[in-house]
Image (tube, rainbow, N blue to C red):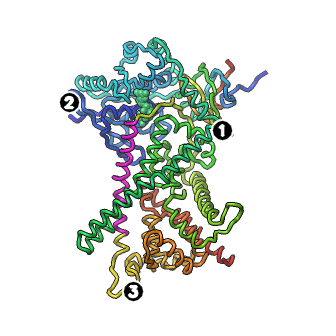
Amino acid sequence: MCKKPKTLGELNKGETGIIVKVKENYKISNRLLEMGFLEGTRVEVIHEAPITKDPIAIRVRGAIIALRRSEAQLIEIENE
Amino acid sequence: MSRVKVALCGPPNSGKTALFNALTGGRQKVANYPGVTVERKEGVLTTPGGKNVNLLDLPGAYSLNPKTLDEKITHDVLFGSLGGETPPDLVIIVADATNLERNLSFVLEVKALNIPAILALNMMDLATHRGMRLDLKLLEKELEIPVIPTVAIKKEGTHELFLAIEHFIDTRSTQVLPKPANSKLSYVRDRFQEVDRILSKVIVTKARPTLWTDKIDKFILHPLWGSLTLFLVLGLMFQAIFNWAALPQDWIKAGVQFVKDIITHNIAAGPLCNLVVDGVLTGVGAVIVFLPQILLLFLFILFLEDSGYMSRAAFLMDRTMEKVGLHGRAFIPLLSSFACAIPGIMATRTIEHRRDRLTTILIAPLMTCSARLPIYSLLIAAFIPNTVIFGPIKLQGLVMFGLYLAGIFAALLVAYILRGVVFRGDCLPLLIELPTYKWPSLKNLGIGLLERAKIFIRRAGTIILALSIVLWFLASYPKPPVGATEPAIHYSYAGKVGYAIEPVLKPIGFNWKIGVALIPGFAAREVMVSALATVYAVEAKGEEVETKLGDILAKDWTLPTALSLLVWYIFACQCLATLAVARRETNSWLWPVFMLTYMTVLAYAGSFLTYHTTLKMGL
Ligand SMILES: Nc1nc2c(ncn2[C@@H]2O[C@H](COP(=O)(O)OP(=O)(O)O)[C@@H](O)[C@H]2O)c(=O)[nH]1
Ligand SMILES: [Mg+2]
């Protein structure tokens, strides 16, 4: 059975994952990589904005990066 | 040979500004890059060997593959492709030692350009405090550029930087051309692999994670407490600009008045005395009276930025602001505009993206600023009965509240339309780093404040002063004939214009006297009250003016006229200083003219509708 891959955009606060793939061919793909969202990197959702739970704050490579869920959707992850 | 040019570059929050201040002692010249709204900051540093070097503080960039206007400038300057800007001979790359896993990628990117470079490894105090130990010699060998540990806020490492710059000057060969940057995805991946390889070699002991930032964030970004804190911070800021600034503003007014009195008593009455007192001094007063508000607002903003809170506020507000197509960072400038649009517009500098910034600048003057209050309270007291609506809620307060709401609503609507029509294009994605919390350095706050004050006085001040003198001239010449019965303003150019525009004002219920008062009132909203007093020849002093004037107006105007003028005041752009600041901040006359036009159209339409609806209702 083929399951749709999980993305960073679907994680709740406190959940973690390992990046498997950053979707290419988007204007923002490049910047996501530059901000440290690289394949094999561990990510953790450490904060959510109030009410909408969007944007989210991610711990990645020792820094905290804030981004919207729509962009986080381009980052595919797997469970640790 | 021309002076050597050194550029500071690095990711946001790595300490570029602090290092710039440490190296130059805060001596700096601030201007804009030609044709754009990005700030260009240059200073001179003197090395121990007596060499003078120009130091340029480049805007923060996460990478050389530009996504914002700021980043494009940094990119273009480094590549020497920005018109009128020679490429730097040497770059000092500033990196945050506590954040090397990410910052080193930028270092490698700049290094790959082949421009001579030095790495300033900043925030070493924090790194050491967190137990990090690095083999700097090995790092130097790996990077093949000099690496100098610094603590910018304590001026540590500046001497070594000076020496490295001197060494560069002494040994420098012919200038090399920068290589094109490679932003291919595979290259970015390779670069990070290289970062990991280098770090695994040079890090002797890893830094402990900062518990502080996480602890503070638990509260600051908490769904309930976080929102409450944001509310409190903003409330305090609003309070400061609105109330705390009032006292120093009164001193300034009193001071200007004091000087005016001295001059009136010591120079023979006549045109010269009038020019100096009513033209120049009034103009100067009109400029410096804004300083307390500007300084207070920027004290807050600089503190919030340097401490790391500003990015968090943008994070918390992102969704709300995005609904009308504004950036999360537009929130603070817009809120400040409730006190005064001038510091508000200056505060839009924190918005990196041009479209977002222009939209914010254009709607800022629709927020009900404190200069509208005198006329609001005059008209409400004179025309609105203070009947109890419900419990403690009375009609007058309700009307005031309605006026505020109308301003906010109009601003959001205009933002929405602007984003849909003029500044099309998708919203810039929010993708920012939330830096660790830091205690701001007082000295850097001071230098930053001084810089804002200078910019305001030099750039906006000159325009405000010049226009104030023109308006004074229009309102005082020609002089009334001998035996004139009416107040002097009737005979002046301003009076003539007032009569001339009466046909245009009639459909919105304004008589010619309002027209006359609108002319000085164009310089600043609050002047309208004293202008009306002049036109209606009210003879009273201080507080009494308003009550007396109120009585006269209540007899002379109908309710539809008063309501129409109130609505006019919600929308009309009656503030020279705002236009002058918008001109300075957007670096073009187009946007202030656009601002004036759309606001006048809104005001006229709003007043027209109000006047005729209320007439029909038989009020
Ligand atoms: N502890 C410490 N704080 C620093 C150092 N350099 C800068 N800071 C602080 O870091 C924050 C960001 O610095 P700033 O110069 O504004 O960074 P920029 O965004 O690169 O211009 C400010 O609060 C500074 O006071 C340093 O070497 N040590
Ligand atoms: Mg800076």
Occupied quadrant, residue B165:
top left
* Rendered residue at 52%/18% (across/down): B208
Q: Residue at x 59, y 35 (%)?
A: B220
Front one among B604 and B485: B485
Which stretch appears magenta? B442-471
Disc assigned to residue B224: 1
- Residue under numbered circle 3: B485
Residue at 37 percent across and 61 percent down: it is B254
Mark closer to the chain start, 3 or 2: 2
- Tag 2: residue type? Gly
Residue B180 in sight: no
Disc 1 marks a residue whose amino acid type is Leu
Give the position of the N terminus of chain B as an image quadrant: top left
Query: Crowdedness of circle 1 by 10 Å Cα count: few (<14), some, many (20+)?
Result: few
Circles 1 and 2 on the same chain? yes
Instruction: Quadrant for residue B6, please give it.
Output: top left
Give percent across and percent down for residue B593. 46, 61
Is residue B390 something one can see in this rendering?
yes
Mark 1–mark 2 distance (CA, rounded to whole Å) = 56 Å
Report x, y in % for residue B45.
27, 33
Chain letter belonging to callout 3? B
Task: In the rendered view, tell whether residue B210 sits above or below residue B356.
Answer: above
Residue that numbered label 2 is attached to: B50
Residue at image point 24% right, 22% down: B171
Depth check, mark 1 against mark 2: the one in front is 1
Disc 1 residue: CB within 8 Å of ligand 1? no
> Which image quadrant is residue B328 in?
top right
Mark 3 or mark 1: name the one nearer the start of the chain. 1
**SS for tag 2?**
loop
